[in-house]
């Protein structure tokens, strides 16, 4: 790793240590003689370097839109933000010191701070040459027909080879329950606009990818390659992260403040869509197979944190449904 950093990025580190890794990445922290720290992200050998490059450039574009991001370091060639080395894809950004992830930590003024950062982000991305916002169908993640097909296939695969672990047995039972609950999920969507805005978005916006320093946003990190999706789906995925919903009993009030700030900065998103964010997120959780499919699709080991996250998603979906009317009334008041 030290050789790679020197050869490709012009960094000669005094030390390199393992850093916090993502679902499909292995990451490092490098410290240079001037005491600067750098976050080094390595993607698997089958990753597409061009997709990684476009994701890195999208992050830099967001920085130009005054969104706090971790600044990328270009390669020595000067025209790339990503290097390929030994089959792996590597990028380097400034390390965001003294920050924690936003999941389960949206309290106080942090709700407004996140609303401001994401409103500024979506407003800036709406002006990107990739394409302006446009009317579209609901986000593909919220599709009961697709959800039924994927859940049915998951149940079939689990039943073909009986579960061996407690997690697999729980995942099979949960998939069956989710499949049986799809009519209720479809009823949730009856009051969601059929045509919704689609635009360029972050692509992987969630609690772990928003870093807080106190009640302020220190950085938005880990962008996905450019794609058009529903900003409401992305907003709900972050603001209604299961860990936040379960940890913060006052999340409807916080969500109302976040959405009000967001709408002030990005008024292109219709009020009717913003009011439906809880309903849409609950429906998304009712359609998804992740992470119930982790074992049968070979997505990686079932770690204690992944199992906890999976169970939290089920509990959070129930909370969102139980408090739906209350939360929507708060949102209507906040957006008047």
Image (cartoon, helix red, strand yellow):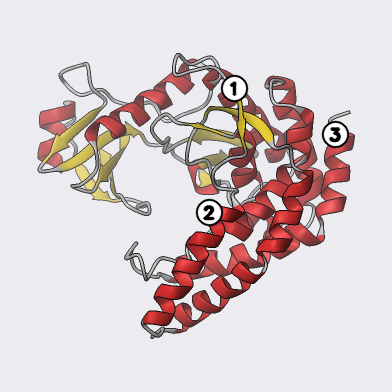
**Residues marked 3 and 1 touching at CB (< 8 Å):** no
How far separated are the C-alphas under marks 2 and 3? 33 Å
Residue at the location (16% across, 21% down)? Answer: 76
SS for callout 1? strand
> In the figure, is residue 70 to the left or right of 73?
right
- Is residue 145 something that shows in the picture? yes
The residue that mark 3 highlights is: 334
The residue that mark 2 highlights is: 146
**Residues marked 2 and 1 touching at CB (< 8 Å):** no
Near-viewer residue (38 or 251): 251
- Is residue 36 something that shows in the picture? no
Question: How crowded is the residue under tag 2: few (<14 C-alpha within 10 Å), some, or many (20+)?
Answer: some
Give how far across and how far down residue 47 sits, in percent. Answer: 24, 43
**Image depth: mark 3 or mark 1 in front:** 1
> In the figure, is residue 118 to the left or right of 226?
right
In the image, is residue 313 above or below residue 237? below
How far separated are the C-alphas under marks 2 and 1? 23 Å
- Name the N-terminal-most of marks 2 and 1: 1
The residue that mark 1 highlights is: 134
SS for callout 2? helix
Give how far across and how far down residue 19 sits, in percent. Answer: 32, 50
Q: Quadrant of the N terminus?
A: top left
């Amino acid at each position: 790793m030290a050789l790679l950093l020197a050869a490709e990025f012009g960094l000669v580190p005094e030390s390199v240590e393992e850093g916090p890794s993502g679902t499909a990445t292995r990451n490092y922290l490098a410290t240079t003689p001037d005491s600067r720290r750098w976050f080094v992200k390595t993607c698997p050998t089958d990753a597409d370097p061009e997709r990684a490059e476009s994701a890195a450039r999208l992050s830099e574009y967001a920085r130009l839109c005054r969104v706090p991001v971790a600044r990328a370091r270009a390669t020595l060639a000067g025209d790339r933000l990503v290097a390929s080395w030994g089959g792996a894809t590597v990028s380097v950004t400034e390390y965001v010191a003294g920050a924690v992830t936003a999941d389960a930590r949206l309290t106080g003024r942090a709700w407004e701070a996140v609303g401001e950062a994401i409103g500024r982000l979506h407003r800036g991305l709406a002006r990107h040459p990739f394409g302006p916002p446009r009317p579209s169908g609901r986000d593909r993640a919220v599709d009961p027909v697709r959800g039924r097909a994927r859940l049915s296939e998951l149940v079939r695969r689990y039943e073909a080879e009986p579960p061996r672990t407690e997690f697999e047995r729980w995942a099979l039972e949960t998939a069956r329950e989710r499949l049986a609950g799809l009519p209720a999920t479809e009823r949730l969507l009856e009051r969601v606009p059929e045509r919704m805005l689609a635009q360029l978005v972050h692509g992987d916006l969630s609690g772990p990818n928003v870093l807080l320093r106190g009640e302020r946003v220190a950085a938005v990190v880990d962008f996905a390659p450019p794609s058009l999706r529903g900003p409401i789906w992305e907003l709900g995925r972050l603001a209604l992260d299961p860990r936040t919903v379960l940890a913060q009993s006052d999340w409807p009030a916080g969500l109302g403040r976040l959405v009000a700030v967001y709408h002030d900065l990005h008024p292109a998103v219709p009020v009717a869509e913003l009011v439906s964010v809880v309903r849409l997120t609950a429906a998304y959780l009712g359609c998804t197979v992740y992470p119930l499919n982790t074992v049968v699709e070979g997505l990686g080991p079932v770690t204690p944190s992944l199992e906890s996250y999976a169970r939290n998603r089920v509990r959070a979906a129930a909370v969102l449904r139980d408090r739906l009317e209350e939360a929507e009334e708060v949102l209507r008041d906040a957006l008047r």
